[in-house]
Image (cartoon, rainbow, N blue to C red):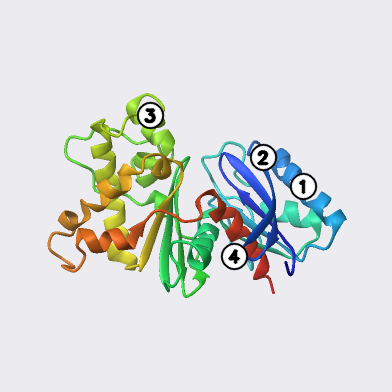
């Protein structure tokens, strides 16, 4: 199998700990994401058991955010102000590195998933791509020429503001911005809008037309700002309602208003696609992070 790595996908609902090589998961343990001490402690225990059996070269952590990804920053690997109760200020990297003593790489869960889909999934062969996940939250990772995009922080595509539809009075569910993309499209936002679990809503319900329009606004913004060769759209909401993506894509040409005339619905359907790796994207990306540790 080659060199052995450990990876942690730290999500808002569940945490997945994996052992494997670049592109190959050999063992997996899934844990609920509760409070930081418990979650990070249990993940660390799993990796320690693997360490006892043999050498692990490095650890990759793919975390929900916002989290400090700049290794030169004094608070590297620390969770910033987040809607996840109890996690603001959590020293994710320091906790795991201190307990395990492994070389550690850290990025966002969506950046890691983007790396995996670019290397092994729906964006293979693309020099520019976006991985968008719509589930408990909404986030986006960006990969250009095989490297994730970072700046002062990391992309926060879930908190951009969208043009609202006339007559839509839903205030949104984001505790910071109300009706940002996450506040309109995430699972909790949809539950707040419709008053029940969105998974129970049939594809024919008219509310999905409103949701598709909001998603189309977000996708149009991404097409215009980053011009990616591929946008991979995953997550529990997107995967659970497969009709939603095609409905959103069909609305993009009208939103472009005759600009970028080659962006037809057919062409956009080739650019904006579902994931190939499914739930393996984040954990596979965490192993890629570990494999890239110098």
| Structural distance between the alpha carbons of marks 2 and 3 | 26 Å
Is 41 on the left-hand or right-hand side of 64? right
Q: Mark 2 points at which residue?
A: 31
**Element assignment for label 2:** strand
Q: Residue under circle 1?
A: 46
Q: Toward which corner of the image does residue 169 lie, by quadrant?
A: top left
28 or 193: nearer the viewer: 28
Q: Nearer the viewer, mark 2 or mark 4?
A: 2
Distance of label 3 from label 1 (alpha carbons): 36 Å
Residues at marks 3 and 1 touching, judged by CB atoms closer than 8 Å = no
Dot placed on the residue nearer the N-terminal end, 4 or 1: 1
Task: Identify the mark nearer the N-term, 3 or 1.
Answer: 1
Instruction: State if disc 1 and disc 4 touch (CB < 8 Å).
Output: no
Look at the numbered disc 3 and give the secondary structure of its residue: helix
- Residue in the image at 41% along x and 66% along y: 129
Q: Which element carries disc 1, helix, strand or loop? A: helix
Local crowd at mark 1 within 10 Å, few (<14), some, or many (≥20)? some
Q: Nearer the viewer, residue 237 or 179?
A: 237
Q: Give the CA separation, mark 2 to mark 4.
A: 27 Å
Counting residues from the start of the chain, the first of labels 2 and 3 encountered is 2
Q: Pointer 3: what residue? A: 192
Q: Which mark is residue 70?
A: 4
């Amino acid at each position: 199998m080659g060199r052995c790595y450990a990876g942690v996908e730290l999500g808002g609902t569940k945490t997945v700990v994996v052992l494997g090589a670049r592109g190959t998961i050999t063992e997996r343990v899934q844990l609920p994401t509760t409070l930081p001490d418990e979650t990070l402690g249990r993940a660390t225990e799993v990796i320690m058991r693997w360490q006892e059996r043999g050498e692990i070269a490095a650890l990759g952590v793919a975390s929900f955010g916002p989290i400090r990804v700049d290794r030169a920053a004094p608070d590297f690997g620390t969770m910033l102000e987040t809607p996840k109760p109890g996690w603001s200020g959590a020293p994710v990297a320091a906790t795991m590195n201190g307990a395990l003593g492994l070389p550690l790489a850290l990025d966002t869960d969506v950046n890691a998933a983007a790396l995996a889909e670019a290397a092994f999934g729906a964006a293979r062969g693309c020099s520019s791509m976006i991985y968008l996940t719509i589930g408990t939250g909404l986030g986006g990772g960006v990969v250009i020429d095989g490297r994730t995009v970072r700046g002062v922080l990391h992309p926060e595509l879930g908190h951009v503001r969208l043009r609202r539809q006339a007559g839509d009075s839903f205030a949104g569910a984001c505790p910071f911005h109300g009706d940002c993309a996450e506040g309109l499209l995430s699972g909790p936002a949809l539950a707040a809008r419709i008053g029940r679990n969105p998974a129970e809503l049939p594809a024919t319900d008219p509310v999905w037309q409103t949701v598709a329009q909001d998603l189309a606004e977000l996708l149009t913004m991404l097409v215009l700002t980053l011009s990616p060769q591929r946008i991979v759209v995953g997550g529990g909401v997107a995967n659970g309602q497969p009709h939603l993506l095609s409905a959103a894509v069909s609305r993009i040409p009208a939103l472009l208003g005759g600009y970028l005339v080659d962006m037809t619905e057919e062409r956009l359907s080739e650019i904006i696609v579902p994931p190939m790796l499914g739930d393996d994207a984040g954990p596979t990306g965490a192993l890629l992070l570990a494999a890239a540790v110098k």
